[in-house]
Image (cartoon, grey):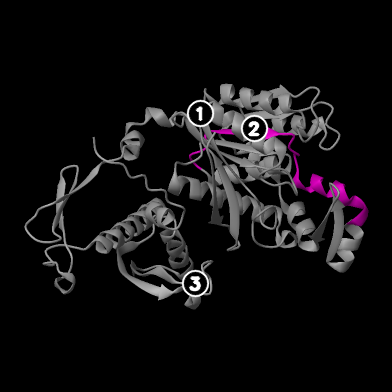
Amino acid sequence: MPNERFQFTGEGGHQLAAALDMPDSPVQAYALFAHCFTCGKDVLAAKRIATALAAKGIAVLRFDFTGLGASEGEFANSTFSSNVADLVRAADHLRETRGAPALLIGHSLGGAAILAAAGQIPEAKAVVTIAAPSDPVHVTHLFKDRIEDIRKHGKVEVQLAGRPFHIRREFLDDVAEHSLMSHIAKLHKALLIMHAPTDDTVGIDNATKIFAAAKHPKSFVSLAGSDHLLSGKRDSAYVAGVIAAWAERYIEPVAAQPAAAAIEAPRHVVVRETRNSKFQQTVTSGPHEMVADEPVGVGGQDSGPGPYDFVLAGLGACTSMTMRMYAERKSLPVERITVTLEHSKIYAKDCEECETREGMLDRIDRVISIEGVLDADQRKRLMEIADKCPVHRTLTSEIRIVTKAAD
């Protein structure tokens, strides 16, 4: 199954590493997966479940929380609340770049975080918890012998799953303040609870409490014989199969939406010489026809934009459109967006953040003007969204151009 790796901006401003497992066939739905405490997006259970769901047509986004895996930031500065906020940011990114998640899945503490975040992801129709605690404070039993030291010193190193992690007093205070039961009671989404009766990390009584607090529709599936981390390959495959079959009842297939299919259909661009001058070309895209040329100074007639002008126009249009879509979805009072771009060549040695150190590099300067009564946070978020436009992502990622002769 195709796996796309990328980054998005978390609640704390850090770049969080993500992976999107895509089906080989058309996407039926998008899902967001939250992994267990101190785990990462590439933990076996997460990878196996995501791969198995992708095989059934469900694209799955999983990511490393702050300070874990390949994500930026310090784990010690993260809290349950920040994890919830990062899940909402992940859903925002998925919505802006692909499609909103209709399915939310959380494993262990990730299940508690998914329950807390679900109310902020309106498009989600179904929620799945796997071995989830009914109260996030439950996680503190993993280092219960160090709690007094954490309270006393403010920050202490503890051993979790054989690895050292720093836990702060703020983390203890944060999990103690969360009332997960109130989130569950107001979920208003279909809920599937999966738990092993013999789970010795998060007891089965947690599943009982979640089930009792939830309103219908709700379901419980026993994971008899599996351990907390779903270490057995058959266990994760079984979990994915049950999720896919159960979710069909509640989520609307993406493929059934004509608008989405129309957006995904590519249009051929045909460029043909006019022979009216040295460089003049006609550029046709569907019903649209334009003229391309070069400036007089390089032998053209300047009868139309040059090749790089079209590249800049594509980036500028995509930037403005992406920002407009976000502004309308968030009901921001944006009156007009203007994007001004310039292409130039620079010496690689003058670019401190570039990997290439020799020769010349292409540089695009993009200046964005946002008209409207917006506060600083809204303007900052809109500027972050500018980098999410698909053309920007294409220009800054590896591109393969396949050239062949016409028949």
Q: Quadrant of the C terminus?
A: top left
Q: Which residues are magenta?
A: 122-146
User: How far apart, in angstroms, are the residues tagged by discs 1 and 2?
Assistant: 13 Å
Residue for badge 3: 358
- The answer to which of 351 and 288 lies nearer the viewer is 351
Residue for badge 2: 49
Q: Helix, strand or loop at disc 3? A: loop
Badge 1: residue crowd in 10 Å (few <14, some 14–19, many ≥20): many
User: How far apart, in angstroms, are the residues tagged by discs 1 and 3?
Assistant: 44 Å
Residue for badge 1: 57
Question: Residue drawn at (34%, 67%), measured in percent from left and top?
Answer: 372
Image: 91 above or below 56? below
- The answer to which of 269 and 154 lies nearer the viewer is 269
Question: Residue drawn at (31%, 42%), measured in percent from left and top?
Answer: 404
Question: Residue drawn at (25%, 63%), measured in percent from left and top?
Answer: 309
In the image: residue 6, left or right of residue 305: right
* Mark found first going from the N terminus, 1 or 2: 2
Q: Is residue 143 magenta?
A: yes
- Find residue 16 and report its image quarter: bottom right
Asked if the residues shown at circle 1 and circle 3 are in contact, with their CB atoms under 8 angstroms apart, the answer is no
Q: Helix, strand or loop at disc 1? A: loop
